[in-house]
Structure formats: structure tokens, C-alpha cells
Amino acid sequence: MSSFIINGGKPLAGEISVYGNKNAVLPAMAAALLTDKTVELDNVPQIRDVNTMGLLLSDLGASLEGLGSRKIKIQSEGLRPKEPDNKLVADLRASILLLGPLLARFGKTVIRHPGGDIIGRRSIDEHLKSLEKLGVKIEVDGIMNKLSVKKLHGAGIHLTEASVTATENIMMAAVLADGETQITNAAAEPHVQCLGKLLNCMGARIEGTGSNKINVQGVNSLNGCSHKIRTDHIEVGTWAIIAAVTGGEIKVKNAIADDLLPMKAVFEPMGVIIKETPSGAKFTRGILKAFPAIKTNIWPGFPTDLMSPTIVLATQCRGMTLAHDWMYEGRMFFVDKLIKMGANIIVADPHRIIINGPTQFFPRHSSSPDIRAGAALVIASLAARGESVIDMAEIVDRGYENLEQRLTGLGANIKRIS
């Protein structure tokens, strides 16, 4: 176990680069299993979840070069039809993305229920129901799922919820299926668009990514290709909040203007000054004021992964803010740690909290329960005057690359101890 030691109270300023989206690179790595040719991924973030997915692919027989660098090569000619490692699957929610590629390659797989952050009930029913429509037979025994199919065939699939990973799994299974698959109420997030671009680069025939209606025409085989992972807009939003909460000025390279739109709609009325630059965006603090109701939504709505850091921003705004995340009933459970640091927060129910601000943060000893809550605690500690300790720093490493080194480069007093 490792911990962050943070002495806060300093405005942070400077320039940083943001690299590939965690939620884009993981499905891209899984998609590389769809061909025995080499798939090269560029702009790869150096985070723990990428390493875990790399270990999963290696255990299945894929060959990886460059893991831990910006550019990795995946070659799956030696892929084996074996059960993915249970411990690694338990560590990584995105391991569920192996279903589509393994069924397309081998027509069968056995996988336990995936793990990952505990932010609420995270069912895989949408995945299983959708794969059944493609011809897959499913046997569920406790946490184990056994799937098999003689030949995948296209189908019309309407998702009861616009699940990102279910949309991605269907896309990956359908690219090598017989006939056409139409996905309605599909997820449209930037990382879904990134996967569609990669699959088409490999020779797939996919139309409509970025909308709620995706068409996939099955092909006989896929090729290798080179693909650049899309910039992580969630991390860009996190740096915007850090600039505002600490009263600094942070320039972020590689930010994509279109991906900023949902957060600009919330952050700018709250007083975060956002200026697009030739290389990305610049974030500074204006007069912070409450946003009446922040509600997560499917893309292009406000992303659920930014809710935890945004709650910290709301504590520094004058007035009352309602924060509502209908997606995950465990997203808000970390706020007791912010309350102990001085935040004025009322928990209305598992999905809604009321924040009254501004309030001063005081240093405390806490622990990171999940990636985004861990980032939120880091931001609160950067605003608090005095020494804070955050245990389980390795959970934050799953989604944020070299966080303490990059914060130090902006003037923060932060170090890691084991």
C-alpha cells in the first residue's frame, strides 16, 4: 500500500500534457484480439489499468511490445481459447471487454464477473442479453459466465440503457458476425467513437459511432493497423477543477475542444474560466458560484466520472448545489471524508447530495475508495492548509498517470510513501 502526503494551500500553475483516455485504450487493447495481425496503439497512458489489461492479454497468449511506454504493439497470432485469469479479471472492470473478441475468435469463453471500482451495482446483464441476440448461449453459475456460439450472426439490438462497455462489446462481436447488426440507444462517448475508428482502420464496416444508432456490417476478417488513442477528457476536466480550487492557472496540452463542451456547460457558470489555446486549453479561477443542479447523463451530458472532483469544486462555490448521479448508487459514498475535512454536505439519498459553500478544507487522514473519489480527495487536500494523508494511492494510479510528479511540476507539495 502507498499513500500521498500533501501539504496544501498553494495555487498551482504551469503546463502539463494529457495523454490517451483510459476508457479508450482498454477496449482498443481488447480489440487487438480480433486479428492475428499486429495492432499498434499510440498515445497510450502509463497507468495501472493498462498494465493489468496487458497482463490479461499476455496470459491469453498475445504478444505485447512496449507495455509501459506511449506506444504498444499487440500481436495475437498465438492467442489461446482459455479462461481469462480470475485474479486479473477481479482487478479490472474493463476485462468484460474480452467477451466480444474471444467469442468472435473462438466461439467460446468462460469469464468470472469483473471487478474494478465499487461505486454501485455494476451488472453485466446488458452485455449478456445483447450477445444472446447475436446467437450466443450463456450459462451462469454464481460469478462465472460460460458463453459459446457456433457462429455469430447480425441482429437488431436495442439497449435498455446506453451502456458504454455493452456498446463496445457488441461492436467487437458484430464486426466478424454474419450479416448486419444495428445497435439502437447506443452509447456515444468519445471512447466509443475512438473504438469505432480503430475497428474501421482494421477493416471493419461500422457507421454511426458518436450517435445513438450504430450499424455494423460483418466482415470475414480484420487486419492490423496503427491507431492513436483519443485524449482523456476526464483528466482534462480534473485539471480544470484543480486550477479553480487552488486558485492557479493550468495550461493543458492536447485537450480536444468538442470533448470540453459538456464540462464547459457546468464549469463556466460555476466560475471556472476556460480558454481554448492552439495546443489545448487554459483553466483559471474566476468568481466561484453554485450551480443549481449538476446531473450526470449519457454523452454529450455531464460525465459521471467527473462528478466526484466536481463535488469538491462545488464546496468552494458560494451558494447551494444539488449533485445528482443517477447511474451509480455508490458514487457519493466518499463524501463523508470531505465532511470530515470541513465540507458542508447533506446526503439526501444514495444518488443525491446537497453542497453548501464556500467552506474551508482542513487537513485529514483518509483513504481512496475508487479512482475518481481518490482524485477528489487529492484536490481537497491541495486546497487544505497543512498536511493531509491519503492511503491507497495505487487506486488513483489506475486512472491518473504519475499524478504526484505532475502536481509537483505545477508547484504542489506532494510525495508518495510506501
Image: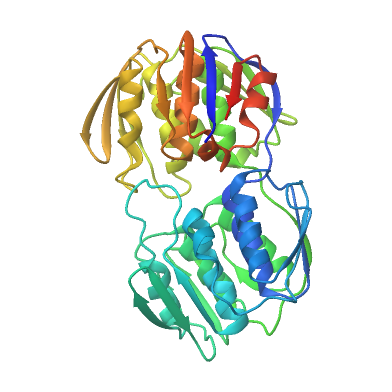
- Name the residue: 59% across, 49% down: 49
Quarter-of-image position of residue 206 = bottom right
Q: Is residue 24 left or right of residue 330?
A: right
Q: Nearer the viewer, residue 188 or 117?
A: 117
What x and y, as percent, mark residue 253?
71, 31
Above-or-below relation of 2 to 194: above
When the figure is inspected, residue 369 is found, relative to residue 149, above or below; the finding is above
Q: Nearer the viewer, residue 22 or 55?
A: 55
Horizontal side of 288 relative to 238 (left or right) equals left
Q: Kindly give the residue lying farthest to the left in the view shown.
A: 348
Looking at the image, the residue that sits furthest to the bottom is 150
Q: Is residue 117 above or below residue 53?
A: above
Q: Quadrant of residue 198?
A: bottom right
Q: Residue at x 41, y 74 (%)?
A: 145
Q: Residue at 32% of width from left, 36% of height from top?
A: 332
- Which residue is located at x 27 percent, y 31 percent? 353
Q: Position of residue 137 (x, y in %)?
A: 42, 85
Tell me residue 62's x, y (percent): 71, 69
Visible in this render: residue 17? yes
Tell me: residue 255, above or below residue 197: above
Quadrant occupied by the C terminus: top right
State how the image is colored: rainbow
Q: Position of residue 410 (x, y in %)?
A: 66, 18
The tally of labels here is: 0
Is residue 212 something that shows in the picture?
Answer: no
Asked whether, in this view, residue 402 is left or right of residue 151, the answer is: right
